[in-house]
Image (cartoon, grey):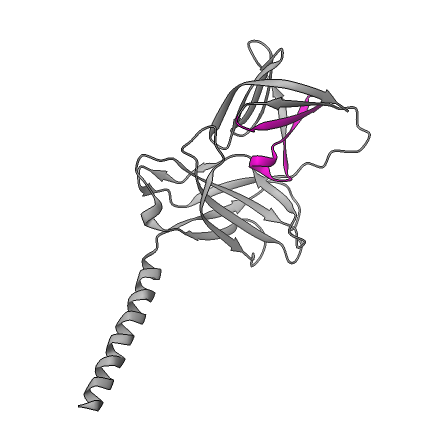
Amino acid sequence: MVIALAVWGAIRTFERSDGSRSTARRDPALTGTVFYRERIALPNGSTAEVVLEDISVADRPAVEIARATIAPAGQVPIPFKLRYPADQIAKDHRYGVRAAILWPTGARMFVSAGQYSAFDGTARSDDLAILVQRVNETVAGADTARVLFECGDDVFFAMRFADGQATLSAPKFLGNDSIVLQRAEAASGARYVAGDTVFWNKGELATFQIGGRTFIDCRATRSGR
């Protein structure tokens, strides 16, 4: 009788353990690659990170759903598999994927200029190809002008203009990184673009499109060097 109970307990323990592993294996995954166009080699010790976020609310920071860190086996493109909890995906929400390549120190070397759509309804987008761009480093002493825009709800964007380019900084969305936008044609005002990141302004009011979200009626608050 004792032996029978022991065997039964072992079987139940195995079933619970095997069930938990099966649940983990059933977590779906987004797949794809991260790449850049610059003809430079990745330094040893670099890593890539891919993040799935809920971007349903346009004027609020994205909500992180899942994150994967990848140690590249070679050069770009870097393949990734991002597992996520299926029960956190709602059909009426919008989800985006962003990526970055980090220096061995952890500082960002390349970042995606915007979000890549992760789902069509609840059907996932497979084989995403995420383009990342070199993080800008502003040269000290360059002939630049800096303007800070306030969009409400504690959302700020800083723009630095020089030589037909504009460098966008947004700590709430980009951390310590920045994106370089190029001057583009506009029916009126000034417009700068990098991928799906767009800045347009006329006078003291501006519109920003970043990470699948749009911020309108952002007002210039101050400028400097």
Decide if residue 163 is in sight here.
no
Q: Is residue 121 left or right of residue 45?
A: left
What residue is drawn where x is 32% and y is 65%?
Answer: 20
Q: Is residue 73 left or right of residue 45?
A: left
Decide if residue 45 is in sight here.
yes
Q: Which residues are magenta?
A: 153-179
What residue is drawn where x is 63% and y is 24%?
Answer: 182
What residue is drawn where x is 72% and y is 20%?
Answer: 223
What residue is drawn where x is 50% and y is 47%?
Answer: 50
Determine the image quadrant of residue 74: bottom right
Look at the image and tell me in which quarter the C terminus lies. Answer: top right
Q: Residue furthest left?
A: 1
Q: Is residue 211 above or below residue 69?
A: above
Q: Is residue 63 above or below residue 2?
A: above
Q: Residue furthest right?
A: 141
Magenta-colored stretch includes residue 177: yes
